[in-house]
Amino acid sequence: MSSPKNYSYAVRALIMAIAAINISYAEQSNNSLALEEVIVTAQKKTESLQDAPISLIAFGSEKIEQLGISDVGDIQGAVPNLSTAPHPSNRNSLTAFIRGVGNADLQITKDPAVGVYLDGVYLGRSAGLTADIADVQAIEVLRGPQGTLYGRNTTGGAISIRSAQADEEFSLKQKFSKGNRGYWRTLTQVNLPITDTVMVRAAFSRSAEDGWVENIGTGKDFGEQQKQALRLAVRWLVSDTLTLDYAFDQSEINGGQLAYQLTHITNPNGAGLAPFSRNTRQSALSVNNLEKSSDDVSGHSLTASWFISDDLTIKSITAYRDLDEFAYQDYSASAHHFSGGAFPSMVASGAEILDTRTDKVQDQISQEIQFLGTLYGKIDYVAGLYYFKEKGREDQLASLNLLALGGFPEIAEEYNEVDASAESLAAFSQFEYTPDLLEQRLHLTLGMRYTNDKREASKYDNLFNNLNGTTVNGEQSSSKFTPSITVAYDLSDDINAYAKIATAYRAGGFNTRGTESRFASGFDPEELLAYEIGSKAELLNRRVRLNLAAFLYEYTDLQVDQSDPVNIIATDTFNAGKAEMSGAEIDLTAVLSRDLLLNVSYGYLDANYESFIQYGQEVSNSKNVPSAPQHSYNISLDYARTVSFGELNAALNYSWEDEYYFSSQGVARKDDVGLLGATLGVRDIAMGDGELSVQLWGKNLENKNYAAHEIDWAASGFVTTIFGEPRSFGLDVTLSF
């Protein structure tokens, strides 16, 4: 558990910050040091962060650059009650949990619980989420269910990424980055007006790194990775009332193998592996013929916006996306390395204790029609229709050979092919009514969504090289009405409070890594009833922004991943009966002085299973809700001062996350960890017709040793661990015109 000392530090820092705010306010009360307004699109319309009755954190382009965010995984630590980790078999993919709700296994037949959106387009698969994002304008993290406006697969929340749009001004930006462990990145952004009505924006990035665990066997190094990303945006102002936006994005990732170490022996079945166990991050491991993983993700979108009148806008978002992924993962590197040559036949043959090879392809189309406007001058509304269809295929070869330590040939091999398709159709609306009574301080919001889902899948499974194999089929359909109601009240011009009741659900699916019978039966949709109260305030002449939220979740049929107690290769997904989650969030932003900005965010979470039926038995007392840290917080100080040659800037960032379990079994665990980062640089240095910016950066400056992910191999009696990135540092140089 976390030390009380760590919390005392956090509390002490907060008290000191508040004191500093008051002192500074007393000294400078006559000066205008108000916080800038933050504009968000969380409710599919443009509005102030303070007006949106949602617990959310938003990052603008400047903060994104300061934090070194280049992919979705980089926001880990910056948002309390958000936990991200690499997918167990592929660093290129990402698992995300918000308020303890998420999905650890990215099967082609199972949907995530945290929806990720790129410019309003839902990304059906989480593969490739660590791909470089070439031209980001803003990132919004919506905590809590978003079933009304975002649909079926947002029981945990949503992450919305907004790219920069083409505009009428020419601009050119070139950024070069260099860091330790062979890291480098180049980013080029250009905005070019073609005519008065047509403008183009393009961005291209490339990067590479050596990783932080050397492979002293043959093949690639662990974590060695190359990335490439391209984005093209075209805006056509067809008329005064019609705007067309076309966008194309493409990302490639090569490499990214995870370095699994044997770290824990959990029962006598794993006693033979004890000599190879190491519970600290190793700088070198050994695997023969370590293969390269790869992800290729691309998409097209066309957004048409018709401004019919001041009271009505119609928006159409049409999109197509596809992905192609190959993931290779070896789970036994420690045994190779720490055998010390005791089993040369294993090393010479390249035999592995446990490894997987997975091929995945998927494509999707989506169409959304939105109607946004005002009725009678009192009712703001968003309504629309949504259609989504995807097809995919996932092939996996899993090899198990616990006798490889003695140089024996492979004893178990399982190959399966899964073909899947899913189709979803929805109608949604949200109405916000502001009556004349109570001086128009009362706001009533009613949301509704009806969703119809269909899913089909077939699985061919071949175990122990059986020439015939077996094929099973599954088919599911479901429909759900997910309403929400919100009551908000403006206590003053700068302070409001809200209460919300919301529902959400996640579609059912099939167990691609389970037995044939478990695949055929599948698992049911999960449902959620959520209660939330909150307050948003701007204080001391808008020098302090303080947002609070508290929530209670009641889950029914919560989808939970569980390793098979007998078959080490298999994973089942269960509907875990009932679960209850409660917690709170505090987000504070304050201007301490003309040059100094403070950000403090804190999250508390209490998550428990009320009922968990596994293989016909009630086991809730022995299960833990995964990826649910009790406490998490982030503290940052941003300094900026104008000097004669530009703007001097510096930032300190510290993020803390309590211990939590990676699975419901309660063995694989991440210990509590705090990570310190910093930047120091000078912006806006005059350079001819352009401006030069130089920035030093560092992450995990204390070189903390922590688990990024662990797997409990159940009956086999051991746990393997991926350790997080050690201290990293580098330099960014940016030239802008």
Image (tube, helix red, strand yellow):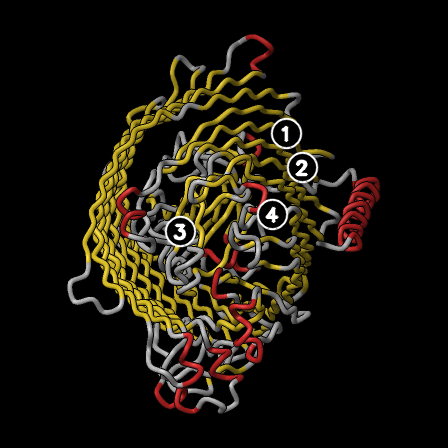
Q: CA distance from mark 1 to mark 4?
A: 17 Å
Contact (CB < 8 A) between labels 3 and 4? no
Which residue is the site of mark 1? Answer: 535
Under mark 4, the amino acid is Pro
Locate the C terminus by quadrant: bottom left
Which mark is on residue 164? 3
Residue at 57 percent across and 23 percent down: it is 499
**What residue is at 51 percent from the left and 39 percent from the top?**
618
Tell me if mark 4 has few (under 14), some (14-19) or many (20+) residues whose alpha carbon lies within 10 angstroms of its own. many
Residue 339 circle label: none
Q: Amino acid at mark 1?
A: Ser
Q: The residue tagged with tag 1: helix, strand or loop?
A: strand
Amino acid type, mark 3? Ala
Which image quadrant is residue 655 in?
A: bottom right
Residue underneath mark 2? 546
| Distance of label 4 from label 2 (alpha carbons) | 15 Å
Query: Closest to the observer: 112 or 157?
Result: 112
| Contact? badges 2 and 1 (CB < 8 Å) | yes
- Marks 4,2: beta carbons within 8 A: no
Kind of element beneath mark 2: strand
- Horizontal arrangement in the rendering, residue 240 relative to residue 619 (left or right): left
Task: Give above or below for 312 relative to 291.
Answer: above
Q: Are marks 1 and 3 in contact (CB under 8 Å)?
A: no
Cα–Cα span, label 3 and label 4: 26 Å
Cα–Cα span, label 3 and label 2: 28 Å
Which residue is at 23% across, 63% downward?
Answer: 462
Tell which tag, 3 or 4, sits nearer the viewer. Answer: 4
The amino acid beneath tag 2 is: Leu
Q: Which mark is first along the chain, 1 or 2?
A: 1
Secondary-structure class at tag 4: loop
In the rendered image, the vertical position of residue 124 relative to residue 543, given as above or below: below
